[in-house]
Amino acid sequence: MPDPMHQFEIKRLVPLEIFGFDASFTNSALFMSIAAVLITLFMVFAMRKGALVPGRLQSVAELSYEFVANMVRDNVGTSGMKYFPFIFTLFMFVLALNMLGMVPYSFTVTSHIIVTFALAAFIFVGVTLIGFWKHGIGFLKFFVPSGVPFLMLPLLVVIEVISYLTRPVSLSVRLFANMMAGHTMLKVFGSFVAALGLLGGWAVLGLMVAFTGLELLVAFLQAYVFAILTCIYLNDALHMH
Amino acid sequence: MEAEAAKLIGAGLASIALIGAGVGIGNIFGSYLQAAIRNPSAAPGQFANLLLGFALAEATGLFGLVVALIILFVF
């Protein structure tokens, strides 16, 4: 059976070196660029004709805007709407990367832990800084839940801090594991279809179609969960508990 | 025992964590369906929480799968 892990290999498309660091333009960078350009072109062209009653393309752009705006307003509150551009960019970027990965023969950027960890680390550090900037050193009260008996406090604070520090880990691993496992399974089922050949492959092909549909749903769902958890963490920092 | 055999056994054992994912996801959707049958008009309002809960339950199982893949392909 061919190796299902081969699809995650990074290939250098344009070898570059900056100050001794390997800064080549890889297939990962190519797809990130394609995602960014695609989102920008889509939003610019869709809103070009700013009609009061939207046509089809403008409708899609407005739907995506409202979807993220409602998510931010429900989870962070109206004072959190100033972070809407960031959450919208994050959601559309992760969604575009996930969806581009579903195109045959393409590369799934979010199936690499370093990419998802970089996103999650930036979010974690940024949200923590926002918390300290807004509440000063009083942000540390976030780790002391109210109404706790005094004797249990040391243990509980340690547990709270540890669970706070695992947020970027869980955020990044969730997206990474879903994408990698999904694409590995697609590759394995695909090789089943090929191995069973022209006569026996049809039943597995049906399963493959259904599973690809599920993977499209997972791509959207994981982007949504990434964004909504960012909103929840932002809410924790802005309005502690 | 040679390293290759130990790796395969370790990966198989780590995948047992996915039982938890299955139980958790079934629990979430089961509760949602039960409540939706009782109070259909309140169901769409909680749909977002359903998806969030599903993703969180799935993630915990996938952490186990990640350990299995690390054992197989990193060591």
Image (cartoon, rainbow, N blue to C red):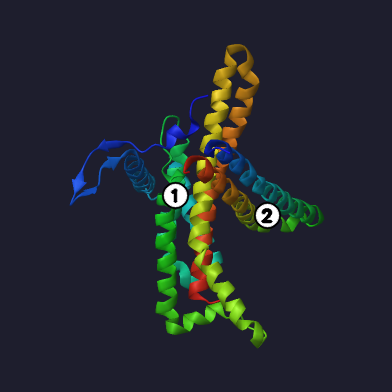
Asked whether, in this view, residue B55 is left or right of residue B36, the answer is left
- Left or right? Give the position of A206 relative to A102: right
* Label 1 residue SS: helix
Q: Could you tell me which chain the residue with mark 2 belongs to?
A: B
**For mark 1, what is the residue?**
A113
* Residue B21: percent from left, percent from top: 66, 49
Q: Nearer the viewer, mark 2 or mark 1?
A: 1
Question: Residue at 59% across / 48% down in the picture?
Answer: B62
- Counting from the top left corner in percent of width and height, residue B49 is at 64, 58
Q: Place residue B11 in its image quadrant.
A: top right
Give, as a three-letter code, the residue at label 1: Ile
Disc 2 versus disc 1: distance between alpha carbons?
34 Å
Disc 2 residue crowd, few under 14, some 14–19, many 20+, Cα 10 Å? few
Q: Which of the two residues, A8 or A42, is positioned nearer the viewer here?
A: A8
Residue B32 in the image: state x and y as whole percent.
73, 54
Q: For mark 2, what is the residue?
A: B44
Rate crowding at label 1 as few (under 14), some (14 to 19) or many (20 or more) other CA atoms within 10 Å. Answer: some
Q: Residue furthest right?
A: B38
Name the residue: 38% across, 46% down: A39
